[in-house]
Amino acid sequence: MLKFILDILSVPAVLIGLVSFIGLVAQKKGLSDVLKGSIKTVMGVLILGGGAGLAVGALGHFGTMFQHGFGINGVVPHNEAIVGMALDEFGTQTALIMAFGMVANVLIARFTPLKFIFLTGHHTLYMACMIGIILTVGGLQGTGLVAVGAITLGFIMALFPALAHPTMKKITGSDDVAFGHFGTIGYIFAAYVGKCLGNKEHTTEEINFPKGLYFLRDSSIAISLVMLVLFLVVALACGPEYVEKELSGGQSFLVFSIIQAITFAGGVYVILAGVRLILAEIVPAFTGIATSLVPNAKPAIDCPVVYPYAPNAVLIGFLSSFVGGVIGMGVLLAMDSPVNPLPIILPSVVPHFFCGATAGVFGNATGGLRGAVLGAMAHGILITFLPVFLMPVLGNLGFANTTFSDADFCVVGTILGNVINFLK
């Protein structure tokens, strides 16, 4: 029996499925709903791992090509990729921190002025994973690790929606819904830049954006195209001989680049499908419990909640943020030296698409069209530099060629890691 319990606690898929089971039972769901939700949650974790394998494999080829072609190590920040890799080793910590962190969020919302319930489940999962990694690297384990991690997670789940809420009210024109996405510091920064440099009298929605570019709103297409450009650049830098001899097994280096770019996008698609399966049962169960315990709380919802309020700002923000990422990469390359080596953060289309689009909406709310462009560009530069400070905190864990991407992960991780190291 003891071995059976330990096996449950050591398998992330089973443990996260157990969390879903408890939440559904607590809501007094029928037997069929409990079984369906629990099995789908376990399946979601397994699918997430399969998608991570696809994405990580493509990133591994990219890192090898980049290093050989340019003689430097390139890192593509990507939350889903690093979480997919980390769950095998830190799955138990992640599941326990996530479960108790959601409880902590409810308690903080119930007994403090931070009346926000964070409902973006995949970011809760990702943040729990990052906190688990950092606390483990810092030497914590067992009950202490879970307690510190859960309290930290619960606090930031309530704090960041509160920080975003003033701008959120400007975007939505109401006080009914809050913003829950762990890129908040980047969005607040974009709104501040927009307020200082923009003109909110001339908004993004006054322009007619070419419909021919609207296909970029499909994240899978955008990821495929941007990664294809990046793969072709590094493939040309390596030369066809190296790629075809060392990596592709004789396949044309151009065909290999195309396949790897779309494989990466496919991996992300599969990961997101797994995440949706995981959260489809956990979040509703948690929401029902939370809203009954904290009746005055505001639900904090994922970043796409702001997209309908400024559709043009979504695309403008994505493109401007990506330009900022390219600028930031250029600055890092200029600063890099043998004496002071720096990780070179490459523009990753996933954060620049989702977070850049959101930064565009926030910048537009405070500074109009100019605020959307400059705010999102500033956001792109910010999320290029923040991972540089986070990477040393994660330790030598073998997460090659990727790291966490969104601003809050980097800020929270850097602060938490340094505090833990200081207290050692």
Image (cartoon, rainbow, N blue to C red):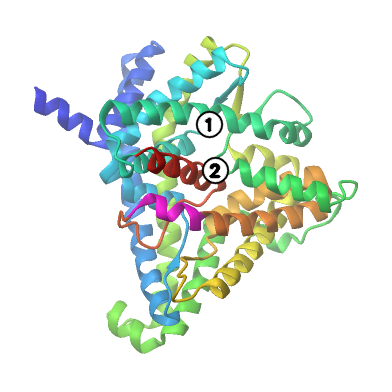
Along the line of sight, the residue nearer the viewer: 236 or 391: 391
Q: Which residues are magenta?
A: 387-395
Q: Position of residue 36 (x, y in %)?
A: 33, 26
Q: Chief secondary structure of the magenta span?
A: helix
Residue type beneath disc 1 = Ile
Q: What residue lies at 75% left-to-right and 57% top-to-bottom? A: 374
Q: Taking the image as drawn, is residue 384 in sight?
A: yes
Along the line of sight, the residue nearer the viewer: 213 or 91: 91
Q: Quadrant of the N terminus?
A: top left
Residue on which disc 2 sits: 408
Q: Compared to 82, does 59 lie above or below?
A: below
The disc label shown at residue 156, or none: 1
Q: Quadrant of the C terminus?
A: top left
Along the line of sight, the residue nearer the viewer: 381 or 26: 381
Q: Taking the image as drawn, is residue 270 in sight?
A: no
Kindly indicate whether the residue at mark 1 contacts the one at mark 2 (C-beta within 8 angstroms): yes
Q: Position of residue 243 (x, y in %)?
A: 35, 82
Crowding near pointer 2: few (<14 within 10 Å), some, many (20+)?
Answer: many
- Residue 265 sits inside the magenta stretch: no
Name the image quarter holding residue 316. bottom right
Q: What residue lies at 70% left-to-right and 23% top-to-bottom? A: 176
